[in-house]
Image: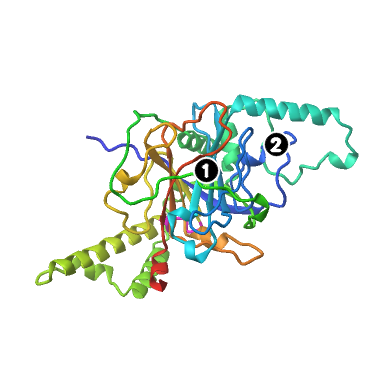
Amino acid sequence: MAAAARRPVLLGLRDAPMAAPSRGGGRAPAWATNKLGGSADAVPSVRLGCPGCGVCGAALLHLVQVYCPLEASPYHRVANVFACAGKGCWGKPQSWKVLRSQCLQAEDKEARDRSLKQKQESNFAASDWCEEADDWGVCDEAESPAYTSLQLLGLNEVMMSNSLSREVECASQFQQLRLSEAKDVSGPLSIRAPVREGTVAASSAPVFQPYYISVVDEEDYTGFIDTDHADKLLKEYQQREGVDLEQLMSESFAGESDNEKYEKSEVKSRDHTFHKFMKRISVCHEQILRYSWGGQPLFITCPPANINKGIPACSNCGSNRVFEFQLMPALVSMLQSDTDLSVEFGTVIVYTCERSCWPTNHQTPLEEFIFVQEDPDQKLFK
Protein backbone atom coordinates (compact mmCIF):
# COMPACT_ATOMS: atom_id res chain seq x y z
CA MET A 1 0.00 0.00 0.00
CA ALA A 2 1.34 3.40 -0.97
CA ALA A 3 2.18 5.72 1.88
CA ALA A 4 -0.22 8.58 2.50
CA ALA A 5 0.89 11.94 1.21
CA ARG A 6 2.61 14.01 3.88
CA ARG A 7 0.57 16.98 4.94
CA PRO A 8 2.28 20.33 4.51
CA VAL A 9 3.84 21.94 7.58
CA LEU A 10 3.78 25.70 8.06
CA LEU A 11 6.15 27.41 10.48
CA GLY A 12 5.35 30.50 12.50
CA LEU A 13 8.19 33.00 13.08
CA ARG A 14 8.26 36.06 15.30
CA ASP A 15 7.96 39.18 13.19
CA ALA A 16 7.77 42.91 13.96
CA PRO A 17 6.42 44.19 17.30
CA MET A 18 2.82 45.40 17.33
CA ALA A 19 2.63 49.08 18.12
CA ALA A 20 -1.13 49.23 18.65
CA PRO A 21 -4.22 47.11 18.07
CA SER A 22 -5.98 47.30 14.74
CA ARG A 23 -9.06 49.50 14.67
CA GLY A 24 -10.62 48.38 11.40
CA GLY A 25 -11.10 50.97 8.69
CA GLY A 26 -11.17 48.48 5.83
CA ARG A 27 -8.14 46.51 7.02
CA ALA A 28 -8.01 43.05 8.50
CA PRO A 29 -9.65 42.99 11.94
CA ALA A 30 -7.49 42.35 14.99
CA TRP A 31 -8.86 38.84 15.48
CA ALA A 32 -7.68 37.87 11.97
CA THR A 33 -4.06 38.57 12.91
CA ASN A 34 -1.52 35.91 13.85
CA LYS A 35 0.39 37.13 16.88
CA LEU A 36 2.21 36.16 20.05
CA GLY A 37 1.52 37.90 23.33
CA GLY A 38 -0.83 40.83 23.77
CA SER A 39 -4.50 40.23 24.51
CA ALA A 40 -6.74 37.75 22.74
CA ASP A 41 -9.10 39.32 20.20
CA ALA A 42 -12.70 38.12 20.04
CA VAL A 43 -14.40 37.42 16.73
CA PRO A 44 -17.79 39.09 16.14
CA SER A 45 -20.62 37.83 18.39
CA VAL A 46 -18.25 35.85 20.64
CA ARG A 47 -17.44 36.84 24.23
CA LEU A 48 -13.91 35.63 24.85
CA GLY A 49 -13.38 36.55 28.49
CA CYS A 50 -10.18 35.91 30.43
CA PRO A 51 -9.70 32.28 31.52
CA GLY A 52 -8.30 31.41 34.91
CA CYS A 53 -5.72 28.79 35.88
CA GLY A 54 -7.18 25.45 36.95
CA VAL A 55 -4.38 25.03 39.49
CA CYS A 56 -3.92 28.37 41.28
CA GLY A 57 -6.88 30.39 39.95
CA ALA A 58 -4.72 33.22 38.61
CA ALA A 59 -5.46 34.89 35.30
CA LEU A 60 -3.92 33.02 32.38
CA LEU A 61 -1.62 34.92 30.03
CA HIS A 62 -2.30 35.00 26.33
CA LEU A 63 0.54 33.29 24.43
CA VAL A 64 -0.50 33.05 20.79
CA GLN A 65 -3.40 33.81 18.48
CA VAL A 66 -3.73 31.81 15.26
CA TYR A 67 -6.11 32.78 12.47
CA CYS A 68 -6.80 29.43 10.80
CA PRO A 69 -9.86 29.28 8.49
CA LEU A 70 -10.46 25.94 6.80
CA GLU A 71 -11.00 25.51 3.08
CA ALA A 72 -14.63 25.17 1.97
CA SER A 73 -15.83 26.33 5.38
CA PRO A 74 -18.11 29.41 5.64
CA TYR A 75 -16.50 30.36 8.96
CA HIS A 76 -13.71 32.61 10.09
CA ARG A 77 -11.77 30.60 12.66
CA VAL A 78 -9.38 31.66 15.44
CA ALA A 79 -7.49 29.71 18.12
CA ASN A 80 -6.08 31.36 21.25
CA VAL A 81 -3.65 29.66 23.64
CA PHE A 82 -3.32 30.72 27.28
CA ALA A 83 -1.00 29.60 30.10
CA CYS A 84 -0.25 30.37 33.74
CA ALA A 85 2.99 32.17 34.59
CA GLY A 86 3.17 30.65 38.08
CA LYS A 87 6.25 28.44 38.37
CA GLY A 88 4.32 25.91 40.42
CA CYS A 89 1.91 25.51 37.52
CA TRP A 90 4.41 24.96 34.72
CA GLY A 91 3.94 21.64 32.96
CA LYS A 92 0.50 21.01 34.45
CA PRO A 93 -2.26 20.66 31.83
CA GLN A 94 -4.78 22.39 34.11
CA SER A 95 -2.73 25.59 33.79
CA TRP A 96 -3.18 25.73 30.00
CA LYS A 97 -6.17 26.46 27.80
CA VAL A 98 -6.82 26.64 24.07
CA LEU A 99 -10.05 28.29 22.94
CA ARG A 100 -11.48 28.07 19.41
CA SER A 101 -13.81 30.81 18.16
CA GLN A 102 -15.69 31.03 14.89
CA CYS A 103 -18.07 33.34 13.09
CA LEU A 104 -19.75 33.18 9.71
CA GLN A 105 -17.93 35.17 7.06
CA ALA A 106 -21.25 36.70 6.00
CA GLU A 107 -21.87 38.01 9.53
CA ASP A 108 -18.41 39.54 9.68
CA LYS A 109 -18.90 41.26 6.32
CA GLU A 110 -22.22 42.74 7.45
CA ALA A 111 -20.65 44.03 10.68
CA ARG A 112 -17.71 45.59 8.83
CA ASP A 113 -20.01 47.14 6.23
CA ARG A 114 -22.06 48.76 8.99
CA SER A 115 -18.92 50.03 10.69
CA LEU A 116 -17.56 51.43 7.43
CA LYS A 117 -20.85 53.15 6.64
CA GLN A 118 -20.94 54.78 10.07
CA LYS A 119 -17.37 55.99 9.63
CA GLN A 120 -18.11 57.42 6.18
CA GLU A 121 -21.08 59.32 7.57
CA SER A 122 -18.92 60.93 10.24
CA ASN A 123 -16.92 64.11 9.73
CA PHE A 124 -13.24 63.41 10.18
CA ALA A 125 -10.43 65.83 10.77
CA ALA A 126 -7.59 65.78 8.27
CA SER A 127 -5.39 64.02 10.81
CA ASP A 128 -7.72 60.99 10.73
CA TRP A 129 -7.05 60.23 7.07
CA CYS A 130 -4.07 57.91 7.65
CA GLU A 131 -4.83 56.75 11.18
CA GLU A 132 -4.39 53.11 10.16
CA ALA A 133 -1.07 53.62 8.35
CA ASP A 134 0.87 51.53 10.86
CA ASP A 135 -1.64 48.69 11.04
CA TRP A 136 -1.00 45.44 9.24
CA GLY A 137 -3.73 43.70 7.30
CA VAL A 138 -5.50 43.52 3.98
CA CYS A 139 -8.15 45.65 2.33
CA ASP A 140 -11.66 44.27 2.26
CA GLU A 141 -11.81 43.73 -1.48
CA ALA A 142 -13.64 40.99 -3.38
CA GLU A 143 -10.82 38.49 -3.25
CA SER A 144 -10.95 34.71 -3.26
CA PRO A 145 -11.02 33.09 0.22
CA ALA A 146 -7.73 31.29 -0.45
CA TYR A 147 -5.89 34.48 -1.38
CA THR A 148 -7.42 36.44 1.49
CA SER A 149 -6.37 33.76 3.97
CA LEU A 150 -2.90 33.77 2.42
CA GLN A 151 -2.55 37.47 3.15
CA LEU A 152 -3.89 37.19 6.68
CA LEU A 153 -1.44 34.39 7.39
CA GLY A 154 1.37 36.65 6.27
CA LEU A 155 2.59 34.36 3.50
CA ASN A 156 2.55 37.23 1.03
CA GLU A 157 5.21 38.95 3.18
CA VAL A 158 7.66 36.07 3.18
CA MET A 159 10.96 36.95 1.54
CA MET A 160 11.63 33.62 -0.12
CA SER A 161 12.95 32.78 -3.54
CA ASN A 162 9.88 30.77 -4.49
CA SER A 163 7.10 32.42 -6.47
CA LEU A 164 3.81 33.65 -5.02
CA SER A 165 1.95 30.83 -6.73
CA ARG A 166 3.99 28.36 -4.65
CA GLU A 167 2.83 30.08 -1.48
CA VAL A 168 -0.80 30.23 -2.62
CA GLU A 169 -0.68 26.48 -3.22
CA CYS A 170 0.80 25.99 0.23
CA ALA A 171 -1.95 28.05 1.86
CA SER A 172 -4.58 26.10 -0.04
CA GLN A 173 -3.15 22.82 1.26
CA PHE A 174 -2.92 24.29 4.74
CA GLN A 175 -6.68 24.96 4.71
CA GLN A 176 -7.83 21.50 3.56
CA LEU A 177 -10.51 20.11 5.82
CA ARG A 178 -11.29 16.42 5.41
CA LEU A 179 -14.15 15.20 7.52
CA SER A 180 -14.49 11.62 8.70
CA GLU A 181 -17.12 9.76 10.68
CA ALA A 182 -17.40 10.83 14.31
CA LYS A 183 -16.13 8.33 16.82
CA ASP A 184 -15.98 8.23 20.58
CA VAL A 185 -12.40 8.19 21.76
CA SER A 186 -11.76 7.06 25.27
CA GLY A 187 -9.03 5.20 27.04
CA PRO A 188 -7.15 4.74 30.28
CA LEU A 189 -4.53 7.39 29.52
CA SER A 190 -4.49 9.91 32.34
CA ILE A 191 -4.62 13.12 30.30
CA ARG A 192 -6.88 15.94 31.38
CA ALA A 193 -9.85 16.50 29.09
CA PRO A 194 -10.97 20.07 28.48
CA VAL A 195 -13.19 21.30 31.29
CA ARG A 196 -14.67 24.75 31.42
CA GLU A 197 -13.10 26.76 34.22
CA GLY A 198 -14.13 30.12 35.57
CA THR A 199 -12.87 33.34 34.14
CA VAL A 200 -11.21 36.25 35.90
CA ALA A 201 -11.50 39.97 35.41
CA ALA A 202 -9.73 40.98 32.21
CA SER A 203 -8.21 44.02 33.91
CA SER A 204 -6.22 41.74 36.23
CA ALA A 205 -4.60 39.76 33.44
CA PRO A 206 -1.00 40.77 32.59
CA VAL A 207 0.22 40.53 29.00
CA PHE A 208 3.36 39.69 27.09
CA GLN A 209 4.69 42.15 24.56
CA PRO A 210 2.80 41.51 21.31
CA TYR A 211 4.53 40.60 18.05
CA TYR A 212 3.21 39.65 14.65
CA ILE A 213 3.75 36.06 13.53
CA SER A 214 4.82 35.54 9.93
CA VAL A 215 4.29 32.19 8.23
CA VAL A 216 6.60 30.17 5.97
CA ASP A 217 6.49 26.70 4.45
CA GLU A 218 8.87 24.24 6.09
CA GLU A 219 9.73 22.85 2.65
CA ASP A 220 11.26 26.19 1.71
CA TYR A 221 14.03 25.36 4.16
CA THR A 222 14.84 21.91 2.81
CA GLY A 223 18.41 21.73 1.54
CA PHE A 224 19.52 24.15 4.25
CA ILE A 225 19.53 21.75 7.20
CA ASP A 226 21.95 22.90 9.87
CA THR A 227 23.04 19.48 11.12
CA ASP A 228 26.01 20.96 12.96
CA HIS A 229 23.64 23.03 15.11
CA ALA A 230 21.46 19.97 15.80
CA ASP A 231 24.48 17.85 16.72
CA LYS A 232 25.78 20.55 19.05
CA LEU A 233 22.47 20.77 20.88
CA LEU A 234 22.25 16.99 21.11
CA LYS A 235 25.74 16.75 22.61
CA GLU A 236 24.91 19.43 25.18
CA TYR A 237 21.73 17.57 26.10
CA GLN A 238 23.53 14.22 26.42
CA GLN A 239 26.19 15.77 28.64
CA ARG A 240 23.54 17.20 30.98
CA GLU A 241 21.60 13.92 31.04
CA GLY A 242 24.72 11.78 31.38
CA VAL A 243 23.74 9.53 28.48
CA ASP A 244 25.39 8.51 25.23
CA LEU A 245 22.98 7.92 22.34
CA GLU A 246 25.39 5.84 20.27
CA GLN A 247 26.32 3.69 23.24
CA LEU A 248 22.69 3.16 24.16
CA MET A 249 21.85 2.20 20.62
CA SER A 250 24.64 -0.38 20.36
CA GLU A 251 24.98 -1.91 23.82
CA SER A 252 23.34 -5.20 24.61
CA PHE A 253 21.22 -5.86 27.66
CA ALA A 254 22.73 -9.29 28.40
CA GLY A 255 22.96 -10.14 32.09
CA GLU A 256 20.75 -7.25 33.25
CA SER A 257 17.55 -7.56 35.24
CA ASP A 258 14.17 -6.84 33.65
CA ASN A 259 13.93 -3.52 35.51
CA GLU A 260 17.36 -2.45 34.28
CA LYS A 261 16.44 -3.41 30.72
CA TYR A 262 13.25 -1.39 30.92
CA GLU A 263 14.99 1.65 32.38
CA LYS A 264 17.70 1.65 29.71
CA SER A 265 15.14 1.07 26.98
CA GLU A 266 13.16 4.03 28.30
CA VAL A 267 16.22 6.27 28.30
CA LYS A 268 17.12 5.16 24.77
CA SER A 269 13.61 5.88 23.51
CA ARG A 270 13.59 9.29 25.19
CA ASP A 271 16.96 10.22 23.73
CA HIS A 272 15.97 9.04 20.26
CA THR A 273 12.77 11.12 20.38
CA PHE A 274 14.71 14.20 21.44
CA HIS A 275 17.29 13.66 18.69
CA LYS A 276 14.51 13.36 16.11
CA PHE A 277 12.92 16.56 17.44
CA MET A 278 16.17 18.55 17.32
CA LYS A 279 17.06 17.29 13.86
CA ARG A 280 13.65 18.26 12.45
CA ILE A 281 13.65 21.79 13.86
CA SER A 282 17.29 22.39 12.89
CA VAL A 283 16.09 23.52 9.46
CA CYS A 284 14.63 26.59 11.17
CA HIS A 285 15.47 26.82 14.85
CA GLU A 286 13.72 30.19 15.25
CA GLN A 287 10.29 28.62 14.64
CA ILE A 288 7.84 29.31 17.45
CA LEU A 289 4.87 27.43 16.01
CA ARG A 290 4.28 24.44 13.71
CA TYR A 291 0.95 24.14 11.90
CA SER A 292 -0.26 21.03 10.07
CA TRP A 293 -4.00 20.47 10.37
CA GLY A 294 -4.62 16.72 10.43
CA GLY A 295 -0.87 16.05 10.31
CA GLN A 296 1.49 14.63 12.92
CA PRO A 297 2.91 16.45 15.96
CA LEU A 298 6.60 16.53 16.74
CA PHE A 299 7.19 15.24 20.28
CA ILE A 300 10.16 16.47 22.27
CA THR A 301 10.12 13.45 24.62
CA CYS A 302 8.61 10.01 24.10
CA PRO A 303 4.82 10.31 24.57
CA PRO A 304 2.66 7.67 26.31
CA ALA A 305 2.19 4.62 24.10
CA ASN A 306 -1.59 5.05 24.14
CA ILE A 307 -1.69 8.79 23.66
CA ASN A 308 -4.12 8.64 20.73
CA LYS A 309 -6.67 6.83 22.89
CA GLY A 310 -6.24 9.48 25.55
CA ILE A 311 -7.18 12.38 23.30
CA PRO A 312 -10.82 13.02 24.22
CA ALA A 313 -13.55 13.45 21.64
CA CYS A 314 -14.98 16.91 21.00
CA SER A 315 -17.09 17.89 24.00
CA ASN A 316 -19.61 19.59 21.72
CA CYS A 317 -20.27 17.14 18.86
CA GLY A 318 -18.47 13.95 19.89
CA SER A 319 -16.18 13.88 16.85
CA ASN A 320 -12.53 12.86 17.00
CA ARG A 321 -9.93 15.49 17.56
CA VAL A 322 -6.97 15.88 15.19
CA PHE A 323 -3.60 17.53 15.56
CA GLU A 324 -3.62 21.15 14.39
CA PHE A 325 -0.57 23.01 15.71
CA GLN A 326 2.07 23.11 18.42
CA LEU A 327 4.12 25.73 20.23
CA MET A 328 7.89 25.34 20.03
CA PRO A 329 10.75 25.94 22.54
CA ALA A 330 11.96 29.11 20.79
CA LEU A 331 8.75 30.84 21.91
CA VAL A 332 9.79 30.68 25.58
CA SER A 333 12.57 33.28 25.26
CA MET A 334 10.38 35.52 23.09
CA LEU A 335 7.66 35.94 25.71
CA GLN A 336 8.70 39.28 27.16
CA SER A 337 6.98 41.54 29.67
CA ASP A 338 7.67 44.53 31.90
CA THR A 339 7.04 42.48 35.05
CA ASP A 340 9.48 39.62 34.47
CA LEU A 341 6.75 37.07 33.71
CA SER A 342 7.66 33.79 32.05
CA VAL A 343 6.23 30.43 30.99
CA GLU A 344 8.43 27.36 30.60
CA PHE A 345 7.65 24.35 28.41
CA GLY A 346 9.20 21.95 25.91
CA THR A 347 6.38 21.80 23.38
CA VAL A 348 2.63 22.34 23.62
CA ILE A 349 0.47 20.30 21.24
CA VAL A 350 -3.07 21.35 20.29
CA TYR A 351 -5.75 18.95 19.07
CA THR A 352 -9.05 20.31 17.71
CA CYS A 353 -12.40 18.95 16.54
CA GLU A 354 -11.99 17.33 13.13
CA ARG A 355 -15.36 18.75 12.06
CA SER A 356 -14.57 22.18 13.47
CA CYS A 357 -18.13 22.21 14.79
CA TRP A 358 -19.81 25.45 15.82
CA PRO A 359 -23.33 25.62 17.29
CA THR A 360 -25.75 28.08 15.70
CA ASN A 361 -25.68 31.50 17.38
CA HIS A 362 -23.01 30.32 19.83
CA GLN A 363 -21.48 33.21 21.79
CA THR A 364 -18.64 31.67 23.79
CA PRO A 365 -15.46 29.91 22.60
CA LEU A 366 -15.18 26.13 22.53
CA GLU A 367 -12.32 24.67 24.54
CA GLU A 368 -10.09 22.21 22.71
CA PHE A 369 -7.53 19.70 23.99
CA ILE A 370 -3.95 20.59 24.82
CA PHE A 371 -1.06 18.22 25.59
CA VAL A 372 1.97 19.72 27.34
CA GLN A 373 5.48 18.27 27.29
CA GLU A 374 8.03 19.85 29.59
CA ASP A 375 11.52 20.84 28.54
CA PRO A 376 13.65 17.77 29.43
CA ASP A 377 15.99 20.03 31.38
CA GLN A 378 13.17 21.22 33.69
CA LYS A 379 12.89 17.78 35.23
CA LEU A 380 16.47 18.02 36.49
CA PHE A 381 15.52 20.85 38.86
CA LYS A 382 12.44 19.28 40.42
Q: 10 Å neighbourhood of mark 2: few (<14), some, or many (≥20)?
A: some
Task: Please tell me which residue is depicted at 35% across the width and 44% down the height of the picture.
Answer: 311
Task: Please tell me which residue is depicted at 71% across the width and 44% down the height of the picture.
Answer: 135
Magenta stretch contains residue 284: yes
Q: Secondary structure at mark 2?
A: loop
Which of the pair 165/373 is nearer the observer?
Answer: 373
Magenta stretch contains residue 212: no
The stretch in magenta equals 281-286
Task: Please tell me which residue is depicted at 89% across the width and 32% down the height of the picture.
Answer: 123
Residue designated by label 2? 27
Q: Which mark is residue 99?
A: 1
Is residue 157 shown left or right of residue 12? right
- What is the x, y in percent for residue 46? 61, 35
Image marks 2 and 1: residues in contact by CB distance under 8 Å: no
Total number of numbered labels?
2
Would residue 160 be visible to someone looking at this image?
Answer: no
Kindly identify the amino acid type of the residue bearing the numbered disc 1.
Leu
